[in-house]
């Protein structure tokens, strides 16, 4: 299935990403921040793509732990790696915007704190997969569930702890001129995330197939 | 249900008996906690006075560090002579084994925390005993949250090679909410003008965290430990 899905998704995300700069350039300048505000069109979607990946990671971890479906495990690795990559994009675009908007690179604000902690959990997940040795797939599935369950707690605790970051509730109320480029790149990022997910999942699948062939060869 | 609790109690009693004979875990963890607080004292007491507002953070970091040490050793005894397999093969509910292990660890950590809290209160001139009940609630709920995740991870990692490194690597990021809640709640109690409403909010949040994560741990213990 993913063999046919991948070119389709890649093509679609390519179209969206090639046209995104045009849409973004045509959008009006924001009155107080000017040009810098345009980072937003890539910053927000990369976080959304990360949350999508974490959600997929959590769900597939549950499925793998209780149903032992190898597909779910492969999907979990792919999703975890993508969550790290998209999270990194958010962590890089965030300070670039922050230095212009707040005058500092970094603030211990609620959203920023939460972003860093989530990134930390996901890197820990990858470390476990890499260095956990045999049987680490099930342990990683356990960690994946805990990572997903942590999201609401991180959200609430950091939200009460500190807040300077603009609230996400501004997003639905954006005027159309700002909203169109935002949702355009949002679609681009989500489709790209799914395309990479199918490619990465397929790579894991083929790796497993090769392992099986090696084992069969040794038995002969 | 009573059978479940009985099995959990048996595991607790076994751990307590082993511990009462060797006292290995208690003494090593206590000594580590004490030296941890002392190291903080050397770092944060300048000119005879503690840095303002450092006490809650130091208290919780000391608890987290010594807790990790205890958690790392929690399943150490079960590693020898295939004791873990024996325990898992017993015809009982597996979550009951987890619960027994968790309770045993909590009893140990209560002793450690009593010492750490007293030390922090003395060395950093923090009015920690101003609201003993609220502080007790914060500490016990925070410890349950931290240890519930830690016991599961410790059990998961028993069979892996690099478990000593992987336990803190996995445990700290996942339990950061507990640390934020615990430190903020304690800070609300010891600041010059205590904010009791804020402390109550953090206690409630910790309670929610505990309910969710203990449930999750009980639910995932069985499939994670199955070979």
Image (cartoon, coloured by chain):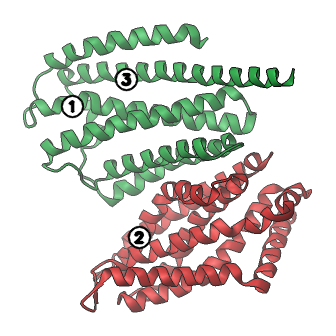
Which quadrant holds the C terminus of chain A? top right
> Which subunit holds the residue at mark 1?
A
Residue B190 appears at what percent x and percent y? 36, 81
Which element type, helix, strand or loop, lies under badge 2? helix
Please name the residue that numbered disc 3 is placed on. Answer: A189
**Would residue B78 be found to the left or right of residue B219 on screen?**
right
- Would you call the spot at circle 3 few (<14 residues within 10 Å), some (14-19), or many (20 or more)? many
Q: Residue furthest right?
A: B91
- Distance from label 1 to label 2 (Cα)? 35 Å
Tint of chain B: red
Question: How many numbered dots are placed on residues in this image?
Answer: 3
Please name the residue that numbered disc 2 is placed on. Answer: B183
Residue B61 found in image quarter: bottom left
Residue A197 visible here: yes
Residue B11 appears at what percent x and percent y? 81, 70
**Would residue B99 be found to the left or right of residue A197 on screen?**
right
Which element type, helix, strand or loop, lies under badge 1? helix
Which element type, helix, strand or loop, lies under badge 3? helix
Instruction: Give the vertical position of A124 relative to B78 (above or below).
Output: above
Which residue is found at the position 69% from the left and 52% from the top?
A: B160
> Which subunit holds the residue at mark 3?
A
- Would you call the spot at circle 2 few (<14 residues within 10 Å), some (14-19), or many (20 or more)? many
Which residue is found at the position 81% from the left and 64% from the top?
A: B80
**Would residue B34 be found to the left or right of residue B151 on screen?**
left
- Distance from label 3 to label 2 (Cα)? 37 Å
Please name the residue that numbered disc 1 is placed on. Answer: A39
Tint of chain A: green
Instruction: Give the vertical position of B148 relative to A149 (above or below).
Output: below
């Amino acid at each position: 299935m993913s063999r046919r899905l991948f070119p389709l998704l890649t093509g679609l995300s390519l179209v969206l990403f090639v046209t995104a700069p045009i849409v973004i350039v045509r959008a009006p300048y924001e009155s107080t921040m000017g040009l810098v505000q345009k980072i937003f069109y890539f910053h927000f979607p990369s976080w959304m793509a990360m949350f999508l990946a974490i959600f997929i990671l959590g769900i597939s971890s549950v499925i793998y732990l209780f149903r032992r479906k190898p597909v779910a495990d492969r999907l979990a690795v792919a999703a975890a790696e993508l969550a790290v990559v998209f999270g990194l994009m958010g962590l890089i675009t965030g300070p670039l915007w922050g230095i212009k908007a707040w005058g500092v690179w970094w603030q211990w604000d609620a959203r920023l704190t939460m972003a860093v902690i989530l990134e930390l959990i996901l890197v820990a997940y990858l470390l476990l997969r890499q260095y956990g040795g045999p049987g680490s797939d099930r342990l990683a599935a356990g960690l994946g569930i805990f990572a997903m369950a942590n999201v609401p707690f991180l959200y609430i605790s950091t939200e009460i702890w500190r807040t300077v970051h603009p609230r996400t509730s501004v997003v639905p109320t954006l005027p159309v001129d700002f909203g169109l480029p935002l949702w355009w790149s949002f679609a681009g990022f989500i489709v790209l995330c799914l395309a990479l997910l199918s490619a990465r999942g397929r790579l894991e699948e083929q790796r497993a197939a090769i392992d099986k062939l090696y084992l069969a060869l040794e038995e002969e | 249900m009573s059978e479940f609790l009985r099995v959990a109690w048996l595991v607790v009693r076994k751990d307590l008996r082993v511990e009462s004979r060797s006292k290995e875990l208690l003494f090593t963890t206590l000594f580590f906690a004490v030296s941890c607080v002392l190291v903080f004292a050397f770092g944060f007491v300048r000119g005879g006075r503690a840095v303002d507002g450092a006490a809650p953070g130091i208290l919780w970091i000391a608890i987290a560090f010594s807790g990790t040490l205890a958690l790392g050793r929690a399943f150490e005894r079960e590693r020898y002579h295939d004791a873990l397999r024996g325990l898992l093969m017993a015809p009982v509910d597996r979550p009951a084994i987890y619960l027994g292990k968790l309770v045993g660890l909590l009893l140990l950590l209560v002793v450690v925390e009593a010492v750490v809290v007293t030390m922090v209160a003395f060395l950093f001139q923090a009015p920690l005993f101003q609201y003993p009940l609220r502080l007790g609630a914060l500490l016990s709920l925070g410890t349950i949250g931290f240890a519930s995740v830690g016991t599961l991870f410790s059990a998961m990692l028993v069979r892996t090679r690099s478990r000593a490194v992987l336990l803190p690597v996995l445990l700290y990021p996942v339990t950061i909410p507990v640390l934020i809640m615990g430190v903020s709640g304690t800070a609300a109690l010891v600041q010059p003008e205590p904010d009791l409403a804020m402390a109550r909010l953090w206690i409630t949040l910790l309670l929610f965290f505990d309910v969710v994560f203990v449930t999750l741990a009980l639910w995932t213990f069985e499939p994670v430990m199955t070979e």
